[in-house]
Amino acid sequence: MPLEPPAFALVVAMDQQRGIGRDGDLAWRLPEDLKWFRAVTVGAGGQSVIMGRKTWDSIPDRFRPLPERENWVLTRQPEYAVPSGVRRAASLDQALAHCEGPRFVIGGGSLYAEALQHPSCTRIYLTVVEGSFDCDTFLAEFGPDWQHSAEFGSGEHEGIRYRFEQWDRVVPAADACT
Ligand SMILES: NC(=O)c1ccc[n+]([C@@H]2O[C@H](COP(=O)([O-])OP(=O)(O)OC[C@H]3O[C@@H](n4cnc5c(N)ncnc54)[C@H](OP(=O)(O)O)[C@@H]3O)[C@@H](O)[C@H]2O)c1
């Protein structure tokens, strides 16, 4: 019997239209959400974050690589250069096979869409941002196979209300290899 790859989680913030970004950046500034993102992805240490190349490009130089986490950048460009210490992979499975500790897919839209179809994706840390932010990038639907399983609080910043949710997969994804 083939070994199951260890599970991984998504960490994402979306608005009421499922929007997650605009013009290659986030469409809001929510300091508490950034703190939440950091707390989840740093955890007790030794964790990995996996992101698409465009999300990596969107992080200002002074904030990347994201500290205290192993940073993985997915790209299909074999010559795409990442700084020393940052890991590059040509596919999600390649990154998952090599990355250390608990792992988190942190965007963007195209990688979330692929990750949600992956049999090892079992949890979503979802920040729900109330309102519509004219986004051009969206979170794929995750449907009835997922259940809202926990709530970690809510808040408001400059008139923008948000809440932190956890969703867990309750129906195992079909194994594409069988
Ligand atoms: N709200 C949130 O929580 C959140 C989080 C993260 C990002 N975002 C937003 O999302 C937007 C970016 O999302 P996006 O969909 O345009 O781009 P993205 O998913 O960040 O990056 C897409 C790129 O990643 C690479 N890639 C993706 N999947 C791959 C795979 N399976 N194997 C190898 N390479 C792969 C490809 O790079 P190459 O073209 O180099 O081959 C692809 O062009 C931005 O607006 C950003 O601010 C929002």
Image: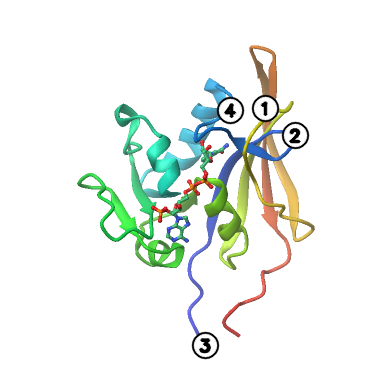
Q: Is residue 43 visible?
A: no
25 vs 45, left or right, is right
Q: In the drawing, what numbered circle is on residue 16?
A: 2
Q: Which residue is mark 3?
A: 1
Q: Mark 1 sits on what residue?
A: 133
- Label 3: state its secondary structure: loop
Q: Amino acid at mark 1?
A: Phe
The answer to which of 130 and 125 lies nearer the viewer is 130
Query: Position of 116 compared to 76: left or right?
Result: right
| Mark closest to the chain's N terminus, 1 or 4 | 4
Query: Which comes before the other along the chain, label 2 or label 1?
Result: 2
Tell me if label 1 and label 4 are in contact, CB under 8 Å.
Answer: yes
In the displayed structure, does residue 85 sit left or right of residue 26? Answer: left
Of badges 1 and 3, nearer the viewer stands: 1
CA distance separating discs 2 and 4: 13 Å
Q: Which mark is residue 27?
A: 4
Q: Residue at x 30, y 31 (%)?
A: 61
Query: In this rendering, does residue 22 appear at all?
Result: yes
Work out whether mark 1 precedes mark 3 in sequence or the reverse, and give the earlier one.
3
